[in-house]
Image: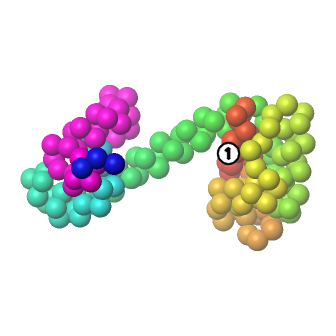
Amino acid sequence: MSDRDDAPVTEETVEELLDRVGFDPEEGVLTRRQAEVLALRQQGIPQSTIAEMLGTSRANVSSVEASARTNVEKAQETVAFAEALKAPVQVEVEPGTDLYDVPQMVYDACDEASVKVNHTAPDLMKVISDEAGDAVGGRDVSEALLVGVTAEGSVRVRRP
């Protein structure tokens, strides 16, 4: 790690950081200001310091950060939706299904489609439970789920 990597992020280096990671406000869901605030917050810089750097109020920085995080969550949800649509394996899990039965359902569908899932049964149950949120309680699937597996073996869970 160079001395430059250890240096605190400043207004000048934020521009370099955004350029290095390929930020393009024309192609993404964040404004330049939102990206700047997220980059600075990621470096552990307090909102009050960012406000001073950007010549604005801490309340404004807080609002910009909240909007940026909301936009990122929406973008992630959109990507998950698009991946689920194109997934070659889609398993519908009915309410009342025992979570312990779901991995075999997914493995059977993957075998039919010649897709390899990248999870063991316990890992797959955890992924499904985590992504399904309150639609899974303990071992009980309480809401319908759509479990998609991409050609690369990644698992996506949707609530129809």
User: From this viewpoint, is residue 126 visible?
Assistant: yes
Q: Is residue 120 left or right of residue 72?
A: right
What residue appears at the point 29 percent right and 61 percent down from the top-left corner?
44
Task: Note whether 109 is above or below 40 in the view shown.
Answer: above
Q: Position of residue 85 (x, y in %)?
A: 67, 34
Q: Is residue 93 left or right of residue 61?
A: right
Task: Note whether 145 is above or below 44 in the view shown.
Answer: above
What residue appears at the point 20 percent right and 43 percent down from the top-left corner?
13
10 Å neighbourhood of mark 1: few (<14), some, or many (≥20)? many
Residue stretch rendered in magenta on the structure: 4-30
Three-letter amino acid code at disc 1? Answer: Arg
Q: Position of residue 1 (x, y in %)?
A: 33, 48
Question: Coloring scheme of the render?
Answer: rainbow
User: From this viewpoint, is residue 34 visible?
Assistant: no
Location of residue 56 (image quadrant): bottom left
Q: Position of residue 95 (x, y in %)?
A: 81, 59
What residue appears at the point 76 percent right and 50 percent down from the top-left corner?
119
The residue to which callout 1 is attached is 156
SS at badge 1: strand
